[in-house]
Image (cartoon, rainbow, N blue to C red):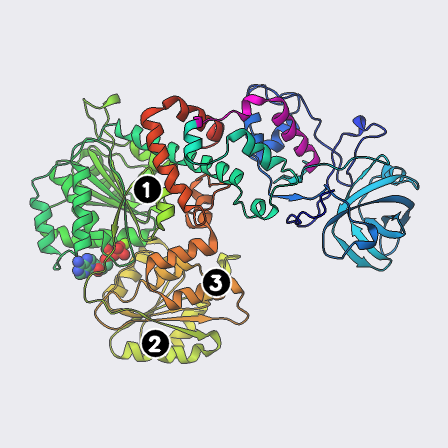
């Protein structure tokens, strides 16, 4: 018994069960007390299509876990381990520390109070422990008959009758049955699939299918990286022997974990870089203009580009001039001036005789782009079509016809509109604002909307794509999930901005804040008042917005108070925004519809109610709506009572920094990449094992290795991607 070994992180004991009733022999090891068992352990099936054909139920459950082939079982790694390699004497059992015990059953009875339950008492060497089952099968009582030798694993607590374990995993054992010599893995699983069944399935593949353990990488490379070979790494993680450091397993710093994490990151890099290469083999129109419109716009805007705007503009211009489809992400903090850079790109397409579309996630934002572009381009003679949900049939038909004929040179509208209906005669460039709201399917659809081109395969040239993002992406995320894109960063704000002052004020002091609003408006400034986010109920959120509007209208009768929410018709929204821009509306009460992109430089005060309910990125975006003019701006974050620690952490970050990159880094730290990427919406498969923060160094290495392999070893690339991605979605965003 390896009693001196440090204890492995053992969380809740899990009820584990799962040998089919029919197969339970007299001496079968049994760890039951779960719903009826499910997984007969079938012989490994070699190919994906015959895989578990005889067990469709099991196949479905495994599919839920992302396991489609035998190879996927091998990379289905444990969440944690339980230490079944040693026994704790009954007399030494300590409450709260999971452990394994063994003893002889002295009694098994069904009790009826406080509710029906099976109570078994084990005894050994003068100690006793009670096993308590609130759910049990009729045969369990027989199985645990007095005199049987039972081994149980669970977390003891002190109950009414002394030390007890609730729903321990247990098995009936022979008197001198050996203990396992490896830690017992606990896998991520799904309803109806017992740990013990999953363990068997995995173990079988590892024992009987040596092909699955073969290294996909050349030994020389593995040696150079100082990583263990794949087979032994996988074996170790599934069946760690008694000498393996529990801490290294738990913290995933063990070389075996490093190997698996490296392989995963490498697969991601290979996949993304391969997409990038495939794109480079496709054709786009070379957009080279005479620069006249660009020059005219630069004169019309009335400001000088910042150094960062200038640099990013030239990066984009370089891409547009090539016959390779550009997929470039233009990243810049809120208010850094991405719109004008995008407009320069659009005009370059126009100069070259092509069309550009400008898409935004919301009507409000699309409308604002339309107004801004129209104003800028008024003197340039560029024809802009506007496509909105609220248009009447005639307006819409006219706009669509202008796009289809090529008469409209720039078209502006929402993401959704373009995807559905619009045909463009000569689409050369698609600009996507707030790209994180733009799904993979939408991007693929864009590809097919290009202009006719005799020299392009299929006769259609693919449009260039420029994605704008105000959500700064931390470097590690950019290197991993966005490795297929080129990234330009505007890392400088236009001059003359005064930083926004952020105040944290308790919600109960709302009345004082209303006075602040009055004072600001009295000096000619304007204000936003953002209503609390109520995720559970859109209706309630709407109600709150309407009430707040009524309240502020009553409190500030001398000013016009506007209202903006998601349920308004597009033309109502547009009228409200126009009135705000014109300065007629002094205070705009809004739900989060104003989250992205709204640009009213005269607005200097932003009040956010129940700021603790918003995410960091959202707060940063909202705050970015003020501080766009030369006047000093303020953002008041009202917070409710009883803040939870995460909400507190968020408010602290937003209070302490206005740097979008730092906020994004903290956000990644607090929320993890899934949320930051909006993975749920866009369907990006996430890394399962590697942690972008902790494993940044591995990521760097994987990047370099991916380049080498793509260049020198296509067969290795195939084998590696097959292992990691076969049957799964690719790591791809576009
Ligand atoms: P975002 O990057 O958040 O989309 P916008 O493109 O809306 O930012 O620009 C924010 C504001 O800054 C706009 O009013 C825009 O006209 C103005 N602006 C952009 N570039 C400059 C510049 N170089 N100098 C001064 N003002 C600028
Ligand atoms: Mg913008």
Tell me the mark number nearer the camera, choosing from 1 and 3. Answer: 3
In space, the residues marked 2 and 1 are separated at their CA atoms by: 37 Å
Of residues 392 and 84, the one nearer the viewer is 84
User: Is the residue 561 above or below the residue 596 in the image?
Assistant: below
In the displayed structure, does residue 527 sit left or right of residue 690? left
Which residue is the site of mark 2?
A: 517
Q: For residue 22, which quarter of the picture? A: top right
Tell me the mark number nearer the camera, choosing from 2 and 1. Answer: 2
- Tag 3: Cα neighbours inside 10 Å, few (<14), some, or many (≥20)? some
Mark 1 and mark 3 in contact? Answer it, CB < 8 Å. Answer: no
In space, the residues marked 1 and 3 are separated at their CA atoms by: 31 Å
The residue at 60%/43% (across/down) is: 79
Q: Residue 716: x, y in percent?
A: 41, 24
Residue 730 at least partly seen = no
- Tag 2: Cα neighbours inside 10 Å, few (<14), some, or many (≥20)? many
At numbered mark 2, what does the secondary structure look like: helix, strand or loop?
helix
Q: For residue 466, which quarter of the picture? A: top left
Please report whichever mark, 2 or 1, sits nearer to the chain's N-terminal start: 1
Which residue is the site of mark 1?
A: 417
User: Which residues fall within the magenta stretch?
Assistant: 194-219
Which residue is the site of mark 3?
A: 613
In space, the residues marked 3 and 2 are separated at their CA atoms by: 22 Å
């Amino acid at each position: 018994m390896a009693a001196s070994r440090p204890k492995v992180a053992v969380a809740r004991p899990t009820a584990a069960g799962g040998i089919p009733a029919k197969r339970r022999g007299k001496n079968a090891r049994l760890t039951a007390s779960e719903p009826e068992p499910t997984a007969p352990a079938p012989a490994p099936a070699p190919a994906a299509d015959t895989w578990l054909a005889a067990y469709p139920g099991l196949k479905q459950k495994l599919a839920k876990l992302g396991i489609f082939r035998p190879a996927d079982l091998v990379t289905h790694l444990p969440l944690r381990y339980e230490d079944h390699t040693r026994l704790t004497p009954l007399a030494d059992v300590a409450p709260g520390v999971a452990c394994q015990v063994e003893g002889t059953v002295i009694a098994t009875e069904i009790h009826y109070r406080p509710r029906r339950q099976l109570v078994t008492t084990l005894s050994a060497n003068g100690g006793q422990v009670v096993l308590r089952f609130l759910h049990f099968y009729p045969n369990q009582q027989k199985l645990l008959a007095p005199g049987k030798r039972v081994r149980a694993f669970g977390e003891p607590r002190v109950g009414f009758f002394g030390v007890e374990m609730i729903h321990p995993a247990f098995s009936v054992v022979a008197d001198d049955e050996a203990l396992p010599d490896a830690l017992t893995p606990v896998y991520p699983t799904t309803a109806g699939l017992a740990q013990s069944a999953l363990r068997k399935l995995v173990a079988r593949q590892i024992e009987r299918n040596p092909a699955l353990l073969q290294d996909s990488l050349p030994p020389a490379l593995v040696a150079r990286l100082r990583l263990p070979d794949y087979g032994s790494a996988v074996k170790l993680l599934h069946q760690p022997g008694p000498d393996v450091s529990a801490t290294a397993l738990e913290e995933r710093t063990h070389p075996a974990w490093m190997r698996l994490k490296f392989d995963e990151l490498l697969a991601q890099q290979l996949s993304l870089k391969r997409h990038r290469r495939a794109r480079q083999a496709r054709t786009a129109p070379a957009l080279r203009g005479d620069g006249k419109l660009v020059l005219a716009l630069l004169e019309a805007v009335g400001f000088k580009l910042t150094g960062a705007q200038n640099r990013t503009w030239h990066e984009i211009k370089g891409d547009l001039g090539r016959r390779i489809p550009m997929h470039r992400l233009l990243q810049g903090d809120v208010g850094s001036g991405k719109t004008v850079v995008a407009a320069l790109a659009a005009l370059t397409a126009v100069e070259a005789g092509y069309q550009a579309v400008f898409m935004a996630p919301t009507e409000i934002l699309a409308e604002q782009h339309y107004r801004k572009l129209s104003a800028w381009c008024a003197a340039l003679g560029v024809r802009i079509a506007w496509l909105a949900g609220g248009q009447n049939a005639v307006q819409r038909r006219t706009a669509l016809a202008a796009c289809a004929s090529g008469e409209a040179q720039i078209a502006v509208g929402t993401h959704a509109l373009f995807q559905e209906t619009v045909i463009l005669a000569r689409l050369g460039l698609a600009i996507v604002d707030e790209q994180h709201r733009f799904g993979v399917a939408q991007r693929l659809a864009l590809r097919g909307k290009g202009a006719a081109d005799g020299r392009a395969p299929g006769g259609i040239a693919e449009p260039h794509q420029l994605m704008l993002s105000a959500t700064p992406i931390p470097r590690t995320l950019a290197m991993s999930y966005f490795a297929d894109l080129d990234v330009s960063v505007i890392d400088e704000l236009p001059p003359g901005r005064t930083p926004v002052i952020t105040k944290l004020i308790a919600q109960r002091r709302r009345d004082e804040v209303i006075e602040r609003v009055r004072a600001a408006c009295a000096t000619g400034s304007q204000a936003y008042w953002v209503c609390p986010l109520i995720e559970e109920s859109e209706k309630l959120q709407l109600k709150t917005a309407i009430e707040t509007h009524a309240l502020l209208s009553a409190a500030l009768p001398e000013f016009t108070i506007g209202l903006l929410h998601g349920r308004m018709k597009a033309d109502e929204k547009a009228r409200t925004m126009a009135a705000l821009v014109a300065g007629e509306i002094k205070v705009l009460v809004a739900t989060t519809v104003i989250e992205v992109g709204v640009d009213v430089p005269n607005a200097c005060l932003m009040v956010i109610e129940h700021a603790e309910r918003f995410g960091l990125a959202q707060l940063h975006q909202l705050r970015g709506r003020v501080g766009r003019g030369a006047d000093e701006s303020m953002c008041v974050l009202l917070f409710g009572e009883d803040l939870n620690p995460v909400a507190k952490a968020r408010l602290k970050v937003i209070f302490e920094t206005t740097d979008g990159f730092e906020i994004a880094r903290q956000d990644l730290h607090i929320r993890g990449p899934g949320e930051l990427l909006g993975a749920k919406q866009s369907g990006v498969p996430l890394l399962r094992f590697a942690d972008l923060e902790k494993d940044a160094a591995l990521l760097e290495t994987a990047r370099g290795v991916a380049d080498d392999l793509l260049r020198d070893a296509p067969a290795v690339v195939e084998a590696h991607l097959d292992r990691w991605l076969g049957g799964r979605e690719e790591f791809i965003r576009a």
